[in-house]
Image (cartoon, coloured by chain):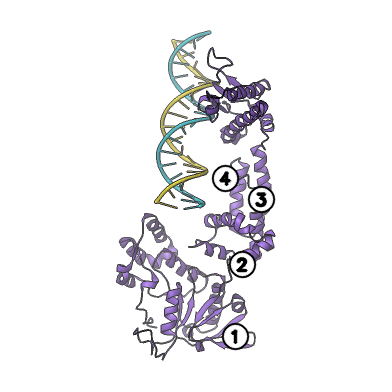
Chain colours: A purple, B cyan, C yellow
Amino acid sequence: MKGANLKEYYRYKILSLLLGKYEASRSFQTGTPGKQRPQFAMARSPLAEDYFDEMDHRKREAIHAALDELASAGVVEVTWPRFQEGRRVEKVYLNFAAIPRAYELAGMEPLEQRMERMRHMLAPLSNHPWEWVRRWWVEVDGALAARRTAGLDLDDGEGYENLVRVLLALPGLEDSVPERIFSQRVLGDSKAFEQGVKKRLLSLLKSHGPEEYETDAEYLDSVGLTDNPKMVLAAGPFIFRAGSAVFDAGGLPGGLGLAVQTVRAMEITAVSAPWVLLVENLTSYHQVVQRFSLPGDEEGEGGGVQAAGLPAVMAVYTGGFPHRGVQLFLRRLQEYRENLAATARPPVYHWGDMDYGGIRIYEYIRRNFIPDLQPYLMDVDTYSRYLHAGIPFGDEYAARLRRLLDDDVYCTWRPLIQEMLKHRRWVEQEGITDFENPPAF
DNA sequence: AGATTATCCTTCTACGTTGT
DNA sequence: ACAACGTAGAAGGATAATCT
């Protein structure tokens, strides 16, 4: 590096160091210069190593040259230890009046301008149809107006531009759309969503979203995005109509998978099973289908429980928090039930893990789809019988569980939650095998 | 006017939280 | 589980205020 270049290099280093301190200082926050100027002591600055390099004096000379120039332009003030004038720099101060000039010389964009640009970029969200997006916008816009960064990466303008586009496009989605297709449609690039927006959208959903979920996929599904279209799995004797065609699922020993479009178009016309069971986990769903929905099946499974004679059940796989397709199916089911007299409705039970997520999934379905939902094998008695197979959990998990105790929505779960807190274990649905007995109706 | 005290501000350090 | 980041509190310095 030649002398002049070295000087410019240090000029930038010095100015960006001082401006960085300025941007973090109260003087910037309040917008009015405080009593103390941004400053650094040379000996303990990032420049110290170069400044005190005994092997290469050109570095110190270049730093002095840069400081001389800045000082005579009135941008900075340099102090020297007594009797060392011009020999060893003590401290460097940035003059408030020269801050615009300092930005110019450093080739940096003033933080205030970058913040204003960001506000302008996010402004379209101010009248977003979703309340939680507006709430986030109010927070962020307020922070920027108050000259605080609020966790935004001000250097990633493009990223936030795409985030805004995505947020504006999401409310228009009908069914779940595959990420890549959505990305292509909204951002013009099938990878752009995954690379630049997904992470921010997820953290936004987790911090401000209307509902807490277990997995990223569930969060994305809640706004209409999936990695791949998902089927709705259901089994047992029920009849539905799609267009003019009528289907009887009872004739299919393993049940069926319904595409979201089918669910949208269908109407459930009859449920001949005496009860309906929603199942959280896939393994358990398959077991339920095998044991309940094949009355008279002689094969069994390798000496397993004799299945013959069990009353049939209509089973629906929810897969954790139900995705949009399942939600639509549950609405169809509820539409059918509401057309019947209250006493004629087949009762709907839900069976999931006895853990934080399982309890919340149950209440989520009850709140949003099936008001008279009942739990199946999710109670203190079953918990105690399977405690030996329970999985231990830690303090943080216990704290989350304890929060449910304070929430009235979960009041019926208090005995179970208290039992779980006492033993510090949760019980997996898959471990429970004695589910042959349907509840007494 | 000089010195001492008070106050304000930056910087350092530790802690908690969040993301990988 | 670990690292990185951000925040909050403590300490050190500098300026301002007050007293003698």
Residue at 60% across, 56% down: A195
Q: What element carries label 1?
A: strand
Q: Quadrant of the N terminus of chain A?
A: top right
Q: Which of A34 and A21 is in front in this view?
A: A21
- Report the disc number at residue A241: 1
Within 10 Å of disc 3 (Cα), the crowding (few <14, some 14-19, many 20+) is: few
Which label sits on residue A205? none
Whether residue C6 sits left or right of residue A380 in the image: it is right
Residue marked by disc 2: A178
Distance between the Cα atoms at labels 1 and 4?
A: 52 Å
Q: Do labels 3 and 1 share a chain?
A: yes
Q: Earlier in the sequence, mark 2 or mark 3?
A: 3
Vertical order, B7 against C6 (above or below): above
Q: Earlier in the sequence, mark 1 or mark 2?
A: 2
User: Gap between marks 1 and 2, in whole Å?
Assistant: 27 Å
Q: Give the spatial CA distance, label 3 vs label 1.
A: 48 Å
Which is closer to the viewer, label 1 or label 2?
2
Please state if A155 lies on the left or on the right of A388 as rendered. Answer: right
Q: How many labels does the image show?
A: 4
Q: Name the residue under label 4.
A: A150
Tell me the subunit letter for badge 2: A
Query: Which chain letter matches label 4?
Result: A
- Residue nearest the viewer, comparing C2 with A362: C2
Within 10 Å of the Cα at label 4, are there few (<14), some (14-19), or many (20+) other Cα atoms? some
Nearer the observer: mark 3 or 4; the answer is 3
Of tags 3 and 1, which is closer to the observer? 3
Which label belongs to residue A158?
A: 3
